[in-house]
Image (cartoon, helix red, strand yellow):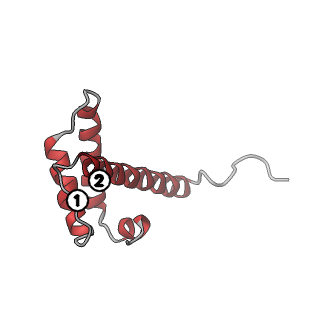
Amino acid sequence: MMSILNVINRMSDEEKSEIKDAVEQNNIKSKNGKYDGGALRFMFSKWKKLFPKVKQNMNCSGCRKSVVRFFEKMVDIIEKEEKEKSKTLTGGLFPTGPRN
């Protein structure tokens, strides 16, 4: 199976944003113990495009958990990368205090 980093690196910013939105929508709904239907369908559709040979069935509770967990992990990595990039762009990695 392709690594999650390889998958992320091949995605456009728009695709990353869509995934982040779907995970966020699902997290809001999951606080009540349910999945967000639209977000779940999006994640399964995206899964099929990314991993056509790895079958997951939306009617299977373990499959739902697995697919949702995968995209949640993906969002964590995307946000971490964005944070790192932001630090670099704003000079956050370079101290501004006196030099020794």
Identified at 25% across, 60% down, the residue is: 14
Identified at 30% across, 46% down, the residue is: 65
Q: Is 78 left or right of 99, judged from the image as shown?
A: left
Of circles 2 and 1, the one toward us is 1
Identified at 32% across, 52% down, the residue is: 66
What is the x, y in percent for residue 31? 29, 29
Asked if the residue under mark 1 is in contact with the one under mark 2, i.e. CB atoms within 8 Å, the reply is yes
Amino acid type of the residue tagged 2 in the rendering: Val
Q: Nearer the viewer, residue 66 or 40?
A: 66
Describe the element under mark 2 as helix, strand or loop: helix
Q: Nearer the viewer, residue 97 or 23?
A: 23
* 24 lies above or below 91: above
Which residue position holds label 2?
67
Q: CA distance from mark 2 to mark 1?
A: 8 Å
Amino acid type of the residue tagged 1 in the rendering: Gln
Q: Earlier in the sequence, mark 2 or mark 1?
A: 1
Describe the element under mark 1 as helix, strand or loop: loop
What is the x, y in percent for residue 32? 25, 27
Q: How many marks?
A: 2
Label 1 neighbour load within 10 Å: few <14, some 14-19, many 20+:
some
Q: Is 85 left or right of 2, judged from the image as shown?
A: right
Which residue position holds label 1?
56
Identified at 29% across, 41% down, the residue is: 24
What is the x, y in percent for residue 1? 37, 71
